[in-house]
Amino acid sequence: MYGTVAGEYDRTGHLRTEVFASGAANAGTLGLVVGDRAPYASEIEFGTGPYELNEAQRQAYLDVLPRGGLLRFGRTGQAYLLPGPYIGPALMFARTLTRERLIALMVALWS
């Protein structure tokens, strides 16, 4: 993990390899699911112990997130209880990008 003393933590890359995304469209509706299958993914997304964010708190951060931005709470090898949201921001970015591309497509089709 970033900020960890060299040799203190063996990076497996497991969290990154367990990320998934899928989409579906039907009857004028687009759906997008982004997640992570690693068993500890929610602990990283929301934090643990006294630093744990509930869904409403995390959503409040996501609501003011700049387009394509990342939430960074200072999670490191030393501060591993802090939240380090990465799925929420990825979903917000994917939603924004999908909306922009869909609008561009519609404009192109109707022009």
Image (cartoon, rainbow, N blue to C red):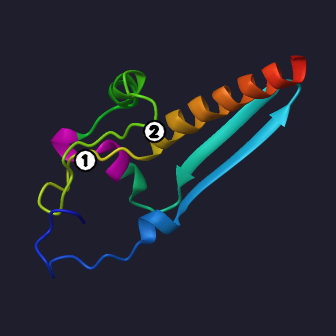
**Residue at coordinates 16% horizontally, 40% vertically from top-left?**
50
Where's residue 38, x and y in %?
Answer: 47, 63
On the rendered structure, is 83 left or right of 22? Answer: left
Of 98 and 46, nearer the camera is 98
Q: Amino acid at mark 2?
A: Gly
- The image quadrant where one finds the C terminus is top right
| 104 vs 18: above or below | above
Residue 87 horizontal side relative to residue 32, left or right: left
Report the residue marked by disc 2: 88
Percent x, y of residue 48: 25, 47
Q: Is residue 79 left or right of residue 37?
A: left
Q: Residues within 10 Å of mark 2 (few under 14, many from 20)?
A: many
* Vertical comparison of 72 with 108: above or below: below
Name, please, the residue furthest toward the bottom: 7
**Residue 48, label in figure:** 1
Q: Which is closer to the viewer, label 2 or label 1?
A: 2
Residue visible at 69% across and 49% down in the picture: 22
